[in-house]
Image (cartoon, helix red, strand yellow):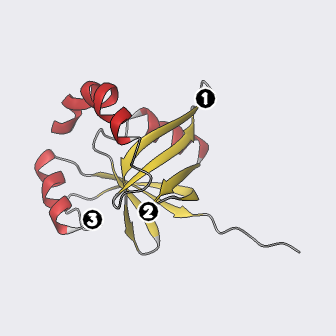
Amino acid sequence: MTMISRLRPFTNRIINPIIRRFAGHVPGFAILSYVGRRSGKRYRTPINVFHRDGRYVFALTYGREAQWVQNVMASRTCEIEERGRKTRLAEPELIVDPTGRLKPQPVRLFLQMQGVTDYLLMSPVRESGGS
């Protein structure tokens, strides 16, 4: 469990509804859309996102047991709205990286201090143009 995990109830109830209003349009933030593995319901979660080598990087601040992570891993896909553009993502890969090398330096330091070492990497789905 990361140190930031203790803030989860407050974040879910108070912070997320506020951030959800702008997260899909501000650099470093996005809205992650996914389907619940049991409910079949579509969820929209504000999230920080980074880019590395053509892939999307999500720091798992609440750990790999977070419901959104479990749902994305089960469906193997999700959609992200970032800077007003929607992209389908696939090929989720959970990794452990204590060095935080996949993130920008200021964020790396903050997450290391919080004990975050788990990350989810995903690739954009290349739409095939059929004729």
If you read the primary sequence from the N terminus, does the residue marked by circle 1 or circle 2 appear first? 1
Counting from the top left corner in percent of width and height, residue 62 is at 29, 38
Residues at discs 3 and 2 in contact (Cβ within 8 Å): no
Callout 1 secondary element: loop
Instruction: Tell me the SS state at disc 2.
Output: strand
Residue beneath disc 3: 103
- Considering every residue shown, the one lying at the far right of the view is 131
Amino acid type, residue under disc 2 in the picture = Tyr
State the image coordinates of residue 80 (x, y, percent, origin top left): 51, 53
The relative height of residue 43 versus residue 31 in the rendered view (above or below) is above
Q: Nearer the viewer, residue 79 or 61?
A: 79
Q: Which residue is mark 1?
A: 41
Q: Residue at x 23, y 33 (%)?
A: 5
Which residue is at a point 44% across and 52% down the rendered structure image?
A: 24
Residue 43, image x, y percentages: 53, 35
Residue 107 location, quadrant: bottom left
Quick one: label 3 or label 2, which is nearer the N terminus?
2
Amino acid at dot 3: Lys
Q: Residue sitting at 32 percent across and 25 percent down?
A: 13
User: Which of marks 3 and 1 precedes in the sequence?
Assistant: 1
Q: Residues within 10 Å of mark 2 (few under 14, many from 20)?
A: some
Q: Which mark is residue 56?
A: 2
Near mark 3 (Cα within 10 A), the count class, few <14, some 14-19 or many ≥20, is some
Number of numbered tags placed on the structure image? 3
Asked whether, in this view, residue 65 is left or right of residue 9, the answer is right
Which is in the foreground here, disc 1 or disc 3? Answer: 1
Q: Quadrant of the N terminus?
A: top left
Secondary structure beneath disc 3? Answer: loop
